[in-house]
Image (cartoon, rainbow, N blue to C red):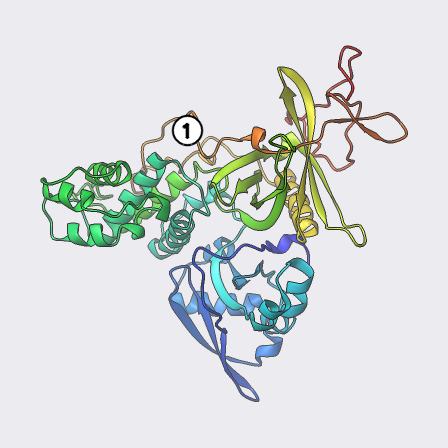
Amino acid sequence: MDGTEGSTGQPGPAERSHRSSVSSVGARAADVLVYLADDTVVPLAVENLPSLSAHELHRAVREVLQLPDIALDVFALWLVSPLLEVQLKPKHQPYKLGRQWPELLLRFTSAPDDDVAMDEPFLQFRRNVFFPKRRELQIHDEEVLRLLYEEAKGNVLAARYPCDVEDCEALGALVCRVQLGPYQPGQPAACTLREKLDSFLPAHLCKRGQGLFAALRGRGTRAGPGEQGLLNAYRQVQEVGSDGGCEAALGTHYRAYLFKCHELPFYGCAFFHGEVDKPAQGFLHRGGRKPVSVAISLEGVHVIDNREKHVLLGLRFQELSWDHTSPEEEEPILWLEFDGDSEGTPVNKLLKIYSKQAELMSSLIEYCIELSQVAEPAGPQDSASGPPSDPSSSPAPVQRPKLRRQGSVVSSRIQHLSTIDYVEDGKGIRRVKPKRTTSFFSRQLSLGQGSYTVVQPSDSLEQG
């Protein structure tokens, strides 16, 4: 197994109970259960399960769901459990990988032995990590869009995709429209909206109380900030259909939701589990570590604080060099090197990410870079910033510049990381404050348009 499989140590949007995708196995036939992003099940009766490939199961799912050919590129089969997630290659044999699951857990997770013994993966049909965003909004099949929408919604509600409050409200309003229909003052569905607030907003924004329900009825106490923003956004959801009618089809709202998610730099990523050093604090200079998610996509790498639900570091591949180490009797480490500054002085920084999945992450980064180098450049109508301008297509959301809010959760917080500044003096690596002569790594993205630079040493810099 290698990093191109999109493996991750993070559980999915919801903590699921242990369940098997193989409900019965006979001498020749088996009933296989494949789960969709909304937790619905696609049952398949298959022959010779042990030798069946992921590609063959994928085709069977597409046939049952009657999906168009584009679904072959959009979706992949994953083996998923609360401890590990693996995107399968077409040639993989899911049954055999399922039998090897305990070995994979021991190799790529730090789970206790008891958890490893009890863990059992299930098959999930979900987005392919290597499907470009620029192609996603060229899709018009409503069922494909619905599956993508359900997966993105689950990641937003679970805060796997950290979002600013304004974005959570806008996305939640589209979910309201899909589930409750067009906004109508005083509608009976207002009670549903109040009672199922966590279906529309991430848990940390759900302030239970009388606010939202009262606001929808036009009387009573005032709604909380998140609730009131959701209500306002719900009122503003546009209802112009593709045929010019007064009510838009659900596909239009699915596309609007995905278009909004494309503003999130980690949309469509594979997620990995790791830890980073905390900056030393206090009189005793205590540091310690904090758990993080490492999100890797075709565009770059993002390190996300699991507890605070915000980005600690976001880098395009042109802005970093990387490597991984797996020394004996020591914890594997993914190393990220990038440009920064210290008190206004340009410096080069080195971040250590401790993870048993360091090798997987390194391989995935390398594979994503290879794909980006061979991909054809996007034209004006094929860019990741929005859908193609096809007059016959359904209307897309109005394009606008991406917001860069002060204190946005998607902005890097390098000050919350403990990094190393260094220089290579020919014999070894010395910590400095702060200079270096060459990159510590040989693995760098060599693209003409890259913005990654090596800071040259200066005699005026103070060595530590």
Measured from the top left, where is residue 241 in percent x and y? 22, 43
Q: Which residue occupies the foreground of this view, 324 or 111? A: 111
Q: Which residue is mark 1?
A: 402
User: In the rendered image of this protein, does residue 392 appear above or below residue 379?
Assistant: below
Front-most of residues 392 and 193: 193
Q: Nearer the viewer, residue 429 or 144?
A: 429
Q: Residue at x 22, y 54 (%)?
A: 195
- How far across and how far down the image is residue 264, in percent? 45, 38
Residue that protrudes farthest toward the front in the picture: 283
**Circle 1: residue type:** Lys
Quarter of the picture containing the C terminus is: top right
Residue 155 at least partly seen: yes
Q: Quadrant of residue 446?
A: top right
Image quarter of residue 184: top left
Q: Measured from the top left, where is residue 120 in percent x and y? A: 55, 71
Residue name at image x 45 percent, y 44 percent: 161
Q: 10 Å neighbourhood of mark 1: few (<14), some, or many (≥20)?
A: few
Q: Where the N terminus falls, by quadrant?
A: bottom right
